Image (cartoon, rainbow, N blue to C red):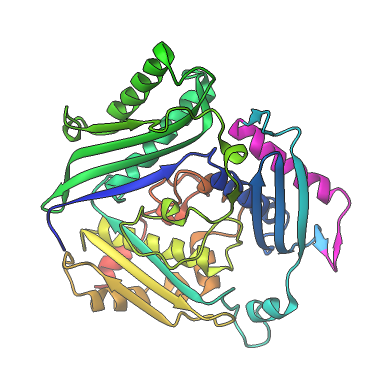
Amino acid sequence: MRANYLFTSESVSEGHPDKVADQISDSIVDLFLSKDPEARVACETLTTTQLVVLAGEIRCKGVYENGEWAPGALAEIEATVRNVVREIGYEQTGFHWQTFRFENNLHGQSAQIAQGVDASGNKDEGAGDQGIMFGFACDETPDLMPATLYYSHKILERMAADRHSKAAPFLEPDAKSQVTLRFENGKPVAATAIVVSTQHAKGYDEGANEAELHAYVKKVVADILPANLLSAATEYHINPTGSFEIGGPDGDAGLTGRKIIVDTYGGAAPHGGGAFSGKDPTKVDRSAAYITRYLAKNIVAAGLAKRCTIQLAYAIGVSKPLSLYVDTHGTGTVGDDQLENAIKGIEALGGLTPRGIRVHLGLNKPIYRKSAAYGHFGRKPEGDFFPWERTDLVDALKAAL
């Protein structure tokens, strides 16, 4: 590993068009799981000027069975979608929660996919698709996340909170951030560049209003980043294009699953390529990515490594993972092969089958919309939410070694 380098990660706000799509898709997952914990959902969302379109496949007892929607189901789906957009805060001419056109193109799950996933006879429940999934953790922040992404998320979370509370009424929902840090001996020592582009009220691109907006952003950055990382040499780029009044789906189309690096580790770790939002937890794109983060985080939390990357691989319809790979990047206190064997020997993990993962983490619940903005990882586990962020496997890992 290089010891001295610059590294950058970006984040996008809840009002970014792709994140609007992610939140809508996950609200549909939550809706169906609230009706049927065994629901199957693969929901994609398109957002553009005054339009939201759903597409995908579902199976849900009491909601969609035998090719028929239950009475009131379609109205509940539309109400759920409009409520997501309302809560984000879109009441603009080009995208308004009350007036956008809505299309629902969800339909039944393929019987051939279902037969591979469903348990039957002596066959355990299989993975919902083939693929590779990665999890990562490092000791750069208290939540064991890459510092560049961690601070990028926190900047936008603060701005969104201020927008909702009216503490910063000139902010509109769409925004992006980017943080570049200089690392020495593998540790962040200075912020060299901060980029923040935020949609704003009319007139906040000139004169005193623009100065107020810039001063506000710099204050947020100063509140979020540790003081020792900021200096007079830190370079700021705030709304570098000038005006940013037209934003959200009116400014750019949004699609589910286009921000997978924002959702994970900001480029600091590999990604298997599969998106999370809109998928029920039989889809290992989601559940296996969560369990690998959980395992990597517990390894670092246990003091067994300073950095850890874990990979799992699956075949559609097959329950057991095809491979498990652990890499502690030379920071481990024990061999990576020992960690692999320790993970395989922990009975509570259920052999890392799709069912074992879901049972251990409690994933068959309506917990997903919260994950669809500001990252799926590095969040605080609260009640049923973000169970993959718990560090309750530390003792079992140590005992297995």
* Identity of the residue drawn at 33% across and 76% down: 325
Q: Please state, as top left, top right, bottom left or bottom right, where the N terminus lies in the image.
A: bottom left
Looking at the picture, does residue 171 appear above or below residue 266? above
Closest to the observer: 370 or 382?
A: 370
- Residue 345 visible in image: no
Q: Is residue 323 magenta?
A: no
Magenta region, main secondary structure: helix
* Residue 254: % across, % down: 59, 48
* Residue 116: % across, % down: 64, 81
Q: Classify residue 321 as left or right of residue 102.
A: left
Q: Does the magenta stretch include residue 81?
A: yes
- Residue 245 visible in image: yes
Q: Please state, as top left, top right, bottom left or bottom right, where the C terminus lies in the image.
A: bottom left
Closest to the observer: 247 or 130?
A: 247
* Identity of the residue drawn at 32% across and 62% down: 296
* Residue 56: % across, % down: 70, 62
* Identity of the residue drawn at 58% across and 78% down: 126
Q: Classify residue 238 as left or right of residue 25.
A: left
Q: Classify residue 399 as left or right of residue 159.
A: left
Closest to the observer: 74 or 46?
A: 46
* Identity of the residue drawn at 39% across and 41% down: 153
Region in magenta: 65-89
